Amino acid sequence: MEFMQVLSSFADVSVWVSLILGVIVGIIGGALPGISPSMTIALMLPVTLYLPGVDAIASLMGAYQGAMYGGSISAILINTPGTASAAATAIDGYELAKKGKAKKALLMSLYSSVAGGVIGIIILLFSAQFLAKIALKFGPPEYFGLMMLSMALIAGISGKSLMKGLISAGLGLFFATIGLDPIYGSTRFTFGNINLFDGVNTLSVFIGIFALSEIMMQLSLGRTELNKKPETLLMDKDTLTIKEFFAEKMNILYASIIGAFIGILPGIGGSTASFVAYAFEQKRSKHPEEFGKGSLAGIAAPEAANNAVCGGALVPMLTLGVPGDVVTAILVGALIAHGIKPGPLLFVENIASVYSIYIALFFSLIVLSAVGHLGINASATIVKLRKSILLPLVFVICIVGTYSSGGSYFDVYAMLFFGVVGFLLRKYGYPLSPLIIAFVVGGMLESNLRRSLLLDDSGAMIFFTRPLSAFLLVASVVFMAFMVHSNQKEKKAAEAKKEEVADEDDLA
Amino acid sequence: MKKVHHEIVSGSVITIICALIYFILIPTQVKLKPNAELGPEFFPKLVVATTGILSFAHTMIQLRSLKAYNASLKDISFSIKGYIDHIIFIALGFAFLLVVEYLGFPITVVLLLIALLFFFGSKGIAKNIVIAVIYGVSLWYLFNVILKISFPPGIFGI
């Protein structure tokens, strides 16, 4: 009954306008190299604060799906992936575009993304309710275990150095303590400034850390480089046939399942999903030799996988309140700003919001296929925009967006501060994703830790006397160890490859 | 080599910041609750101490690796030259915030955009002015008129 009521709210024209705008903004953000999906959503968030609930959810979900597809446009046309998850698409996409088949490549990418997105939603529908039911039995120690599991994903996103990832997360946790203490209500690090009593404005952190620091990094490239016009390949008339698309149906199905399950696991994300799906399809294919030379299968697999990640990543986010990656961390912040608190209680107290998210995700895919198809020729223009024009425009959006989220210029000062912090951390090789994830889960982590410790006299033993919290803590440690091990393995493989190349150069 | 120097500098700076927070900021900026079990300072202390220890350990590891490169701490140098553009850029942001209260949002944002477009290397005076005016006014219209977000008016009443 409630589902039908929510569905009827999507009959409103304003919801569809929000969906369309969300998808367009997402595609543009994803297509522009240097503007990540997380940055796109962070920049769009202030505008959504002024929209009614369903409209806001629709625009956010539209932007999420749009950005995941948008990354492939620049990957195919200028061999520069707009997002990390589109890196695998560039391998065959650009090769196909060089052969004069850019349109075919873009259409394959679009429809694989849509198909992958649909399969991701189906997996979300089947697993979310079940997981939420289990999570309803959680108390503070179990929640603390969950938050620790979320923190453990930092090991996976720390890049080359786990130590630097942990330091970055420590800074994020510290920033989360600014404001009123969650248990006693005492002020902390507010310097008597009333603007800090509710903590640092989440948007100031998101926009400063992601958008502003990125602009500052790009500034280091120099004006000549920033003013260069990207070379794009000409759009041809050779389009994708239905036969060619359906020839990849099993490829898309497998890639989507891989993508959705990788999305559910915290900390792995779209780029891994697309490369795993690419490698899987190459092994499965009857013509593996065509991969890397402009194979349509090489575009379909990563694109289906990275859009399926969206549905998968929403499973832990909605049911447990645990963000699986940076984009979902920002979505958690966005939903909280709209009065929707992700977690198992959401499925009991506010099931209408859950339905809105499901429906918005599904409709955003329909809009994506239409907007993506109609705008295929315009996409070549988007990626041609010079950075010397794009970056100032983005900076102004950062200022206006941050101001409008709280109606105070203090938040803009905070955004500039976090921009500098983000820039310095990036400059010195500290990953920013751990900082954002720690900042988002920091408040919950602290209150659940302290509440658990105050529950009885057993102290820290409480986490080990309750089976589920003990399991979650052990799982966090195992997960972290696994991530560290695989990171080191990758590092060693990269070093070995480097040495091999050096030896070959010497021989030459 | 330069990378190791970077690691040492960043690790040391974070360690010092953590020490300052732990010993100066927490005692002065956290309002303590007398007799409270696990008071408001508990979690910040835990976080800052852990981060400080990690960054100290990171610095020490990098210091040890200096030997492998046969280098010393004396080689560490810092030049502000590479950061001048970034400083000007952030200064433009602060200048905007100072001026916006007097000139109002639409005028200040157009001026900021013109300055930024030239600063980022976009060529063509007329082109930059047109972009700045169209974009600035569109943004103001979107936020102020459509989304009803009020920006404090400046001396010209807008």
Image (cartoon, rainbow, N blue to C red):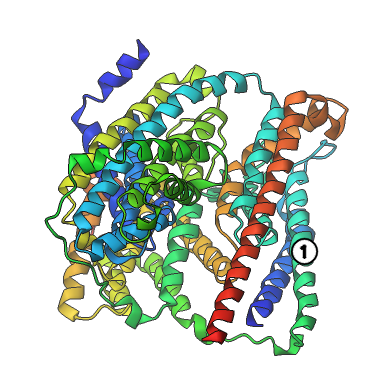
Q: Taking A468 as reference, is A79 left or right?
A: left
Compared with A499, A464 (above or below) is above
User: Residue A460: horizontal and vertical position, in percent?
Assistant: 83, 34
User: Residue A398: horizontal and vertical position, in percent?
Assistant: 38, 58
Compared with A194, A159 (above or below) is below
The answer for which chain carries disc 1 is B
Front residue of this view, candidates A376 and A41:
A376
User: Residue A461: horizontal and vertical position, in percent?
Assistant: 85, 31
Front residue of this view, candidates A157 and A211:
A157
Residue located 73% across and 62% down the image: B18
Outermost residue toward the right in this view: A457
Q: Taking B19 as reference, is A306 left or right?
A: left
The residue identified by callout 1 is: B19
Q: Considering the numbered disc 1 on the image, is that residue within a helix, a strand or a loop?
A: helix
Q: Quadrant of residue B123?
A: bottom left
Residue located 26% across and 25% down the image: A10
Outermost residue toward the front in this view: A286
